[in-house]
Image (cartoon, grey):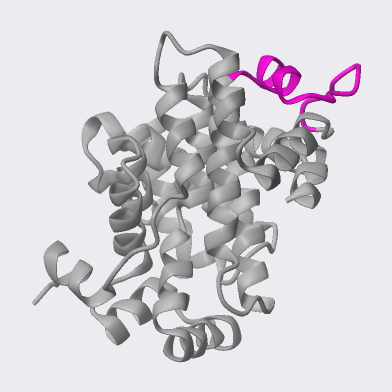
Amino acid sequence: MPITPQELIANLGDLPPLPQVASQVLRVSADPDATAEDLRKVISMDQALTSQILKISNSAMFGMMREVTTLTQAIMTLGFSTIKSVVIASSAKNLYHRGTVGLQERLIWEHALVSAIASRAFAKSLRFARVEEAFIGGLLHDIGKSVMGVKFPERYSSLLRTVYNENGVCIQLELDTFGFDHAMVGEALVTQWNLAPSLQAAVRWHHDPIQAGADHQPLAAIVALANHLALEEKVGIGDPAHLEGASQQAMEILKLGPEALAGLKEGVRSAIEQDKTMIAEF
């Protein structure tokens, strides 16, 4: 019998909270009356986050003509929406890197970043209105893997080795082993973090985007395509062939034929190559 959401949370115990500064940044960036100074005051309380934002502001990803040297400049240059993405990325990195950081953890984090960049690029090409939300969806789609790695270090590490060495289907192995999978765990986490329902749906249904609510299907589809592309680029753990079904669903949702998708992928691969500086900065 399928596990219920209540049983899922009970099995996981306490989920890691969104850091306080990140939570405040999300609140301020959602306030239409907030100013850059309001945002600067919140971010400046976290020295590591301030440094991260300045690094990203000066990365090749944004192609600035002059160096960004102050937090206020960075906020004005990037805008509230992109700042929000960077803050969530920084918070997510801390979770992806909790505990012992070995090869598996690095592969999962690199896959998350490449998926985020690919999601943003797909969203831009498809004229999806919420480009930064696509970035966050790509970044967080596998966050449940990191939570499971923290909660069940030995069993989950063994499971990932099976995926890596024996071409196992990750989500099926998770269901067989734990009774729930990383997509369900990720949804529980981003729901606790109070992120948008569309992001909750994208995290939950990136392997099965047709199951997302009609309003949330486009974002789930974009994340599904980005997830597949990242594995095709050999970034992450798993066989891209196992994601063909999710990509087929995504193509239906986004009304893309094979030729159109192939053309989009070329542009997305170029974006990943261009944004390698950002990956290095994280």
Total tally of numbered discs in the picture: 0
The location of residue 188, given as percent across then percent down, is 28, 57
Horizontal side of 69 relative to 137 (left or right) equals right
Q: Is residue 265 visible?
A: yes
Q: Which residues are magenta?
A: 61-79
Residue at 36%, 37% in the rendered image: 252
The quadrant in which residue 275 appears is: top right
The location of residue 123, given as percent across then percent down, is 53, 29
Residue at 39%, 17% in the rendered image: 31
Quarter placement of the N terminus: bottom left
Residue 166's place in the image compared with 51, above or below, is below
Residue 142's place in the image compared with 71, above or below, is below
Q: Is residue 258 visible?
A: no
Residue at 63%, 50% in the rendered image: 113
Q: Is residue 37 magenta?
A: no
Residue 79's place in the image compared with 20, above or below, is above
Residue at 90%, 16% in the rendered image: 65
Question: Viewer-proximal residue, 77 or 31?
Answer: 31
Residue 64's place in the image compared with 146, above or below, is above
**Residue situated furthest right in the rendering:** 66
Question: Viewer-proximal residue, 189 or 34?
Answer: 34
